[in-house]
Image: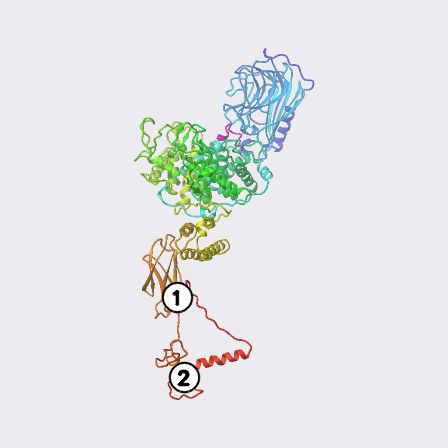
Amino acid sequence: MSPHVPGRHPSPSRPHVSRTIAGALTAALALGLIAASPATADDGDVFSSTWELETDASDSVEDRDGEVLDDVTFADGSAQFSASDDSEIRLPYERNLEPGNGEWVLELTDVVPGSRTGSHQAVATSRSSNNQGWALYIMPNGEFRFWSRVVGQGQWAQFPTGVIAQPGTSYDITVTYTPGSLTTEISGGADVTVTGEIGIPLINSGNSPIRLGNGDDLGDGFFYRGSLGSISLTSSPRQEPWAACEAAADTAMPVATPDASVLDHAIPTDELTQLSLEAAQNANRYITTTFWDEEFAAEPGEYIPLSRRVGAPEYALRGVSMAAVNMSILVATGGYDPEDTGVTEDEVRERIVRMVSSAAAEHRSNNPAGWGPEADRWQASLWAYYNGFAAWLLWDDFSPAQQACVTNMVAMEADQMVDPEYYRNAEGTIVIPGDTKAEENTWRSSLSGLAATMMPEAANSDQWRSDAIDLALAGWATPQDVDSSEVINGRALDEMLTGSNVESDGTVENHNLMHPIYMLAFDQNVNSALTQQLGGQQPAEAFFHNIDLTYEAFVDLQFDSPPWQAPGGTIYVPGESSIYYPDGNDWGSTFPLYFAQGDVIAATYDVGGDVSTPPAVWAERHLQDAIALQDRFEDGRTYLDNSESNYGLREERTAQIAAHTFLTRFLNAGQVCTTDRPYTSDTDDALLGELEIVRELMATPEWEELPADVQDAVAAALADLESARTDGTDEDVQTALRSLQLELVAGGDAGVLTEIRTVVAQAQQCTIDLPIAITAPGEADAGDEISIGLTGGEPDTEYRLLVDGEELATLTTGADGAGRAMLALPTGAAGTVTVRADAGESWAEAEITIDAVDPTDPTDPTDPGTPTDPTDPTGDGGPTGDGGDVDGDGTGQDGDLADTGTSPLVAVLAVLASLALFGGSCLLIVRRRLNAGR
């Protein structure tokens, strides 16, 4: 017996629990009832090891034999520890024996403490060099106490027992963890059971063994003086948490998945898109190989206990979610290349589901002890955005229960979103020196925007979208905006803003620096724009507010040295791809992909402002620099060491940036449209959304000054268009749109009508294919003056109007490509004529049927076309009182049809009329000529 260990006072009835368990587990192994090897373990396996410390540290259940250091001795069936550095037993790390999301049990038998050491004594611990894990301590005052690191808590959680260890007394101690609670049972020298609440344990991440007798972070302190009979660890079958998500959902929240037509097209071949794709694929090669292999390849089961792996929640959750975004964007757009990574697309899809579902299942919406929401956990809404966005892109890959995990997470974050925060208040006073809130506001906008687009039928969806816009505007507001009457998406800036976050020159202060890296945080506003586009909507202009101002600061704002750091100049060095940091950069030296994303946003959405060198030029330079960095490494990583970037998640962040940059190009390589709609309705239809602006203009005093017939005609045409868009065909929509445009032209040139024409034109250009067409009557008489309408034409262009090749008039279109003109048809026109509106390469034609006119009978005085006799004093060509020869035949006989001046046709019609009257009815044939514009 060690001289440091007093004689044992045996407990009245020392149970041999561990030996019983060991025997049972051995039998179970023989019968195949539990797993024989963790390397091949499946979901549902029980993991257990027992070390009987009679003569050594061999595992009686598995092959996890421990290592006994020199100052450990064995006596009386127990290991004896002398409170010295080499008095330690090291048990091999096994991930599956760490606390999971099922039941976990630690059993220590015959714990006989010696005299106190004046410090903490670690009887058993998995405490690792990253300050995580669990520990059973004898406290300096002698109390047995279990400790655990818990997700979201900086300090160790402690679970007192109130039992003071008596030297020489034997204790059996069992600690049982089940999700949400921890129970400590002590028998032998005491009889105590204590249960307390516990969050999600942060486990030993694998860099340290389980230690007996020695237990601070590095294994060189907290020495135990005493003995230990055995230790047993058991982890029950891992429970996948998905069902708990369904149980946590208040109501089912239908998800509107991304518009298939938006994603179903070839990857554009332009230079910027291809460079963006190359950078994203390089980063993906790292994520799919090195990152996955190091982080998750050994994880059994579909559920990955993410937040239990790393003490800092950002490092546990953000990196994984950014990696998922990279993979998900490439898969959804057809940009994933399995030949480049050696991993099939099906396998990558499974990984995305595992990573995202696991993160979402650990959110507080699904686990009361979990992470989030933003009000309680800074940055939580950003992680939720990344995970939610990755899931949304591949929504059908997730089971209904996993989908519930995601929707619960996104909805809780959106429902509990914090109000906008400000660096300066409305009076211009800096309230948070050196710490802009641009970054926080914009990432929060990303989450709210995702929630609104992803779940448009949710009860709070309108509020979520409103939050997204408010946060975006607040995030990139300048002091001038606070007093500005400008209205963006229905918000008057001077009414909604109570402060600002961006300097008047477009720069941003963060980390107590004028910080170019944080000047790029407008990319998080654009996240919401991309989400809206994926949902088939036009992105709100609020998400691009003041980007031009900041981009101009990158390219052309001069920083003199001094006071700024040498050498002075502009942030973007003219003619180069390098970056000048006027106030330094605390994140490192090399961030070309960060700036490339800003360049691509500015170039793609045309928000680069008035700069000396176009954004596309800078984008190409910075993308080429980023790819050159990646080409240094076979696995596609970007960074060599901390000098280039000291951010612990630098590769995951780069992968996410690269993927979002590529997505920006993928969605917008062609025409780019944004909307200033006020969101006064809940429609997600892009055309109907734009017509909200028309409705607002029709509520202005200027509208009320228009003639009533103009108001009525335009209002009716607008209603017809809205109805056609809601219930009609594409052809119906085109017809109704043309009618509205022509009614606006006919209404005149009042300012409000011009504004409406502009809005309708922009809405059409971004939502409807409207080929050039003529609107004309289908039938007309020769010589008629008819109205010709033209829609879908070139804006502000004069068209020649030709009839069968002969130019007879001109028509000038407005800015909307629509116009009207009057055209006189030739008097000699007959049959079908072709009317052509021609402006060179832009032209349209329509056919008009000309009605035939009966020739005039010069002998028929009843025909209106018969000229009157100039010698007839009555002037009406009728018979005279003296019975003269009125028909010129010289007979003057009564009863002669010619004498009566009645033609045979008239006589026939008279007979028919008589017959009709005799039958009690009269048939009236009316021919109505339709002539548009008359």
Q: Mark 2 highlights which residue? A: 880
Q: CA distance from mark 1 to mark 2?
A: 46 Å
Query: Between disc 1 and disc 2, whose residue precedes?
Result: 1
The answer to which of 688 and 665 lies nearer the viewer is 688
Which color scheme does this rendered protein use? rainbow
Q: Could you tell me which residue is drawn at 47 percent across and 71 percent down? A: 926
Of the pair 649 and 417, the residue shown nearer to us? 417
Alpha-carbon neighbours of circle 1 within 10 Å: few (<14), some, or many (≥20)?
some
Span colored in magenta: 304-315
As drawn, 427 above or below 864: above
Vertical comparison of 647 with 332: above or below: above
Q: Looking at numbered disc 1 in the image, what kind of residue is underneath it?
A: Ile
In percent of width and height, residue 257 lies at 50, 45
Residue situated furthest right in the rendering: 12
- Whether label 1 touches label 2, CB < 8 Å: no
> Where does the image place residue 737, in percent across and percent down from the top left?
44, 55
Q: Residue furthest top?
A: 3
Foreground: 431 or 551? 431
Please tell me how crowded label 2 is: few (under 14), some (14-19), or many (20+) other residues with Cα within 10 Å.
few
Q: Which residue is mark 1?
A: 848
Relative to residue 864, is residue 367 drawn left or right? right
Q: In the image, which is nearer the foreground, mark 1 or mark 2?
A: 2
Q: Secondary structure at mark 1?
A: strand
Res. 389 in view: no
Spot occupied by residue 514 in the image (x, y as percentages of width and height): 39, 29
Question: Which residue type does callout 2 highlight?
Answer: Thr
Across and down, in percent, residue 691 comes to 46, 50
Of helix, strand and loop, which mostly describes the magenta segment?
Answer: loop
| Position of the N terminus by quadrant | top right
Quadrant of the rendered image containing residue 184: top right
